[in-house]
């Protein structure tokens, strides 16, 4: 069930990605992104396929799978889909819901403009991607 | 080698893809805060495990990136390193050693963070570059 506008704003304000935004900015984000729900077992992003978006998890859990093998799980406050959009390449993993999932969605072409309008969100995202790079590099060595 | 002029410095910075499309104000500021440093062949520019103090852009020369005892990349003019430590303030993941006499421009963490906050184009270039590297690290892992 969709959240009421004040509930949605409260939820967003509690997520670290949006932690540096003012209340009016969070309201703007809530307005700009669309709320969506997916049942358990659904593939939201498909490895190798174009046509995607940026998703922020409000509730629920997804598995990141590459060639059918689970690599990671994401939950409340995590986000996905941004890598393909930033790189203009198809997703390299499937993203599959492990239970009912409640997300905010932004269309791919809108992401870069959105980040430019909200530099603090871009900076939080930058830190998350930097962390992934560190983890990926450790893995390799 | 003598010091380079500020025009040369600006031209060198403008040629770096990381700084493509940033505002004139940002470029002027960057040129002002970037300091020129030089390392003779064989000397370490940064060391793995140290807390980073900034971003380096190679102007002339050649450097190699070493993790543990493995060389993982070599870097030439226009290429940069050190940005991860600026973003997350964690220790450096690798050492970088000058292979030839190498001249670089160094941008202190504080100055780079201020630029990232004030110029979304720079943050966007950096986020794309990091995303690209995450993907390529993932691909190597598969092999």
Image (cartoon, rainbow, N blue to C red):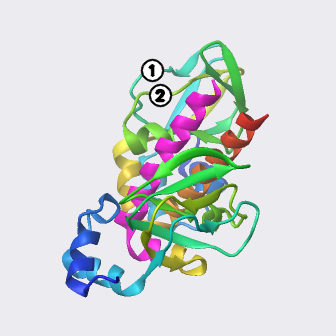
Camera sees residue B62: no
What residue is at 41 percent from the left and 77 percent from the top?
A117
Q: Position of residue A138 (x, y in %)?
A: 56, 28
Asked if residue A93 is positioned above or below residue A44 in the image, the reply reads above
Q: Quadrant of the C terminus of chain A?
A: top right
The lab-note entry on whether marks 2 and 1 share a chain reads: yes
Query: Do the residues bearing badges 2 and 1 touch, measured as CB atoms within 8 Å?
Result: yes
Look at the magenta stretch and give its main secondary structure. Answer: helix
Asked if residue A141 is positioned above or below residue B103 in the image, the reply reads above
The residue range painted magenta reads: A114-141
Is residue A132 covered in magenta?
yes
Kindly identify which residue carries mark 1: B49
What residue is at 38 percent from the left and 57 percent from the top?
A124
Camera sees residue B140: yes
Q: Between residues A42 and A111, which one lies in front from this camera angle?
A: A42
Q: Between residues A38 and B84, which one lies in front from this camera angle?
A: A38
Q: Position of residue B16 (x, y in %)?
A: 64, 52
């Amino acid at each position: 069930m969709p959240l009421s506008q004040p509930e949605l704003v409260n939820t967003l304000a509690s997520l670290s990605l949006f932690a540096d935004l003012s209340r009016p900015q969070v309201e703007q984000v809530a307005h700009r992104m669309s709320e969506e729900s997916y049942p358990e077992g659904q593939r939201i992003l498909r490895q190798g396929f174009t046509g995607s978006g940026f998703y922020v998890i409000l509730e629920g859990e997804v598995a990141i799978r590459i060639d059918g093998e689970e690599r990671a799980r994401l939950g409340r406050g995590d986000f996905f889909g941004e890598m393909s959009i930033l790189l203009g390449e198809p997703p390299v993993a499937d993203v599959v819901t492990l239970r009912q999932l409640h997300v905010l969605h932004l269309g791919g072409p809108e992401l870069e403009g959105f980040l430019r309008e909200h530099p603090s969100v871009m900076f939080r995202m930058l830190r998350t991607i930097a962390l992934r790079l560190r983890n990926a590099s450790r893995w390799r060595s | 080698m003598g010091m380079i002029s500020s025009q040369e410095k600006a031209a060198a910075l403008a040629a770096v893809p990381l700084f493509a499309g940033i505002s004139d104000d940002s470029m002027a500021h960057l040129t002002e805060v970037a300091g020129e440093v030089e390392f003779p062949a064989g000397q370490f520019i940064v060391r793995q495990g140290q807390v980073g103090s900034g971003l380096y852009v190679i102007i002339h020369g050649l450097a190699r990136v070493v993790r543990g005892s493995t060389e993982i990349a070599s870097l030439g003019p226009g290429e940069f390193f050190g940005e991860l430590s600026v973003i997350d303030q964690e220790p450096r993941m690798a050492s970088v050693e000058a292979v030839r006499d190498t001249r670089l421009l160094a941008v202190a963490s504080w100055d780079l963070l201020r630029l990232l906050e004030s110029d979304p184009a720079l943050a966007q270039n950096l986020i794309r570059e990091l995303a690209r590297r995450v993907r390529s690290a993932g691909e190597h892992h598969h092999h």
